[in-house]
Image (cartoon, rainbow, N blue to C red):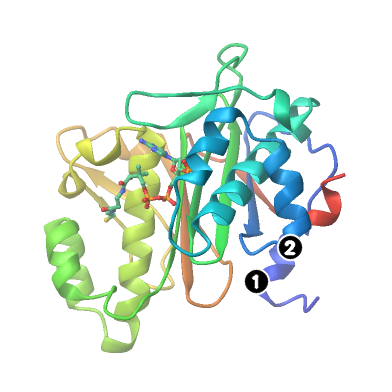
Amino acid sequence: MNPTSPDAAWLDCPKSPALTDGELHVWRARLDQSAETIRALHETLCDEEKTRADRFHYPGGREYYIVGRGILRDILGRYLGVAPNRISLSYSSHGKPALADSGGEAAIQFNLAHSGLLVVYAFVLGRNVGIDIERNRPDFAGQRIADRFFSPREAYTLRTLPKDQREAGFLNCWTRKEAYIKARGEGLSFPLDAFDVSLKPGEPAALLTTHGDESEAGRWSMFALETEPDYAAAVAVEGQGLAMQQYLWSPKHTD
Ligand SMILES: CC(C)(COP(=O)(O)OP(=O)(O)OC[C@H]1O[C@@H](n2cnc3c(N)ncnc32)[C@H](O)[C@@H]1OP(=O)(O)O)[C@@H](O)C(=O)NCCC(=O)NCCS
């Protein structure tokens, strides 16, 4: 592997990873796995997930869902030292999944996101965490969408960027906003224009301001993730000074 490529920051997945307080673990995988891997991952899903998988009718939908959930179970199984099919998940009123039997405040919290052919996961102990990834699509990263979804400050910052930085700025903004909303777990019931994130390419990812509660922004950290070309991704996590470790999931570790 080229040590200067973004992949150099992603380590091969450990069989029994250890997550300690103050660490943030991010995992990334491809959704387009082999039929054999998909079959093995499908075996680990609960009945509800299998039913949900069968409801996808667009090409790849069923398989991508199985892979996304199957890998989530595989990774959680590694942290917890239990078989993936024995993991039980619960959902908040807005649909955010969590470990059903979490075992108290210091329990593993996680979030996942998928776009295109990639899925990403974030794991921490006892803190809210959210992650988002977006593959750039033609006609996605435009000022019209920014004016509709971003805060006035973000939309203005985007408009005033040099033209060749606007697409990257848009994706930075989108993924950072979505990661924060997902960390809070409230879905789109939390207004998108009620907070500002950084978006200029080259500047660190950050929650800049939260309108109505000045102390809120200081309670969070944000990280931008480099994955594959044409994708942007970000994590939002409660607290400061966390050390991030990045892992690449691969099917050779499923047995
Ligand atoms: C529920 C929501 C998280 C879905 O987001 P999405 O972009 O469609 O999907 P993502 O790939 O980011 O995330 C999907 C995962 O988030 C998780 N999720 C679901 N509800 C969630 C919630 N309320 N909070 C956090 N995570 C949630 C699930 O694990 C889901 O994975 P699954 O398919 O295996 O169930 C929600 O934030 C949403 O509808 N966003 C709309 C996008 C938008 O308008 N963004 C504006 C950004 S400026």
Type of residue at label 2? Ser
Type of residue at label 1? Pro
Write the residue at 49% across / 57% down. 61
| Quarter of the image where the C terminus is located | top right
Of badges 1 and 2, the one in the foreground is 2
Q: Residues within 10 Å of mark 1 (few under 14, many from 20)?
A: some
Q: CA distance from mark 1 to mark 2?
A: 24 Å
Of residues 100 and 110, the one nearer the viewer is 100
* Cβ atoms under marks 1 and 2 closer than 8 Å: no
Figure quadrant of residue 228: bottom right
Residue for badge 1: 6
Q: Earlier in the sequence, mark 1 or mark 2?
A: 1
Under tag 2, what secondary structure?
loop
| Rendered location of residue 118, percent (x, y) | 56, 62
Residue for badge 2: 34
Figure quadrant of residue 78: top right
Write the residue at 33% across / 65% down. 199
Of residues 88 and 38, the one nearer the viewer is 38
| Rendered location of residue 163, percent (x, y) | 26, 87
Write the residue at 48% across / 60% down. 233
Left or right of 207 on screen, residue 153: left
Under tag 1, what secondary structure?
helix
Q: Does residue 127 appear anywhere in the picture?
A: no
Figure quadrant of residue 108: top right
Of residues 49 and 108, the one nearer the viewer is 49
Task: Report how many numbered discs are placed on residues in the image.
Answer: 2
Q: Residues within 10 Å of mark 2 (few under 14, many from 20)?
A: few
| Rendered location of residue 11, percent (x, y) | 77, 58
| Quarter of the image where the N terminus is located | bottom right
